[in-house]
Image: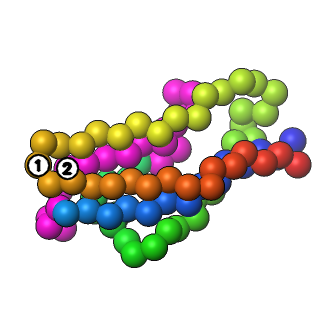
Amino acid sequence: CKASFTFYLHIDTAETTTSTAYDKLTVTAGTTTLASYSNLNKATGYTQKTFDLSSFAGTTVALKFSGVEDSSLQTSFVVDDTAVTTS
């Protein structure tokens, strides 16, 4: 069985640094980190992200987005059109 997790991500930030990740978004499946994003990944528009979940086939797993923001300039992690597909 093949399983995948997809979503669109837009990152907008007021941070001006090009070297320090002050604000972070982590994507996990159970205890497995699928990806980490930060203010350093800012971009115009949405980008599609796809992850293979086939190793979790036959199990129940929680998919989670966890964000951490520092106390100064904002970063927005905008997630849209999440989907899990199997074949």
Labelled pair 2, 1 in contact (Cβ < 8 Å)? yes
Q: Quadrant of residue 62?
A: top right
Left or right: 38 with respect to 46?
left
- Is 22 a magenta residue? yes
Query: As shown in the figure, which amino acid type bears the numbered disc 1?
Result: Ser
Give the residue at x 47% y 48%: 35
Left or right: 58 with respect to 14?
right
- Does residue 78 sit above or below 16 in this rendering? above
Q: Which residue is mark 2?
A: 22
Image location (x, y in percent) of residue 45: 45, 73
Image location (x, y in percent) of residue 3: 77, 45
Q: Quadrant of residue 59?
A: top right
Describe the element under mark 1 as helix, strand or loop: loop
Left or right: 33 with respect to 20?
right
Disc number at residue 72? 1
| Residue depth check, mark 2 versus mark 1: number of the one nearer the observer | 1
Which color scheme does this rendered protein use?
A: rainbow
Describe the element under mark 2 as helix, strand or loop: loop
Distance, label 2 to label 1, CA atoms, is 9 Å
**Which span of residues is magenta-colored?**
15-35
Front-most of residues 32 and 13: 13
Give the residue at x 32% y 64%: 12
Sequence-earlier tag: 2 or 1: 2
Q: Residues within 10 Å of mark 1 (few under 14, many from 20)?
A: few
Image location (x, y in percent) of residue 83: 69, 49
